Image (cartoon, rainbow, N blue to C red):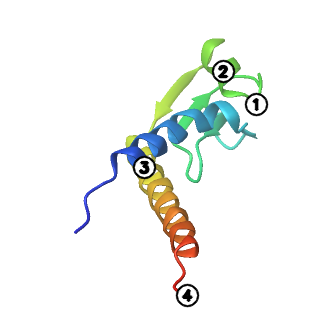
Amino acid sequence: MKKLDKNYTALSLLICILIPFVIPSKYFIEGMSRYKYGFPFPYITIYQNKPNSIWFGNNFFTGNAGLLINPLTFILNLIIIYLIMGFIVNKFKSRKVKPQ
């Protein structure tokens, strides 16, 4: 079994942390209204009484009705981004090295 690459792990962790700040959410009104953040699976949910903003910073720092952080989907996102980065890097490495 291969060891985890520390650089890929650190970069995928950084990407997972920054995604909510970069990708906006939409307003869900089923049940209690909320905004969901995270990609490919949402791992942060901010509950609101009335719509505020689609951006994470505005909703997090200006009054909300509740906050849910799901660590399992965060770890799943981390694994998915790590695997995608490893796949892309391996594809580029295999393209560079062509026997002649």
Q: What kind of element bears circle 3?
A: helix
Residue under label 2:
57
Q: Is residue 12 left or right of residue 22?
A: left
Give me the disc on residue 54: 1
Q: CA distance from mark 2 to mark 4?
A: 53 Å
Q: Assess whether mark 1 and mark 2 are in contact (beta carbons under 8 angstroms).
A: no
Vertically, is 51 above or below 90? above
| Structural crowding at the residue carrying mark 2, measured as other residues with C-alpha within 10 Å and reported as few (<14), some (14–19) or many (≥20) | few
Vertically, is 36 above or below 21? below
- Amino acid bearing label 1: Ile
- Amino acid bearing label 4: Gln
Q: What kind of element bears circle 4?
A: loop
Q: Indicate the position of residue 21 as horizontal and vertical percent values.
A: 65, 30
Mark before the other along the chain sequence, 3 or 1: 3
Q: Indicate the position of residue 25 as horizontal and vertical percent values.
A: 71, 38
Residue under label 3:
8
Q: Residue at x 52, y 75 (%)?
A: 97
Give me the disc on residue 67: none
- Amino acid bearing label 3: Tyr
Q: Between 36 and 32, which is closer to the camera in this rendering?
A: 36
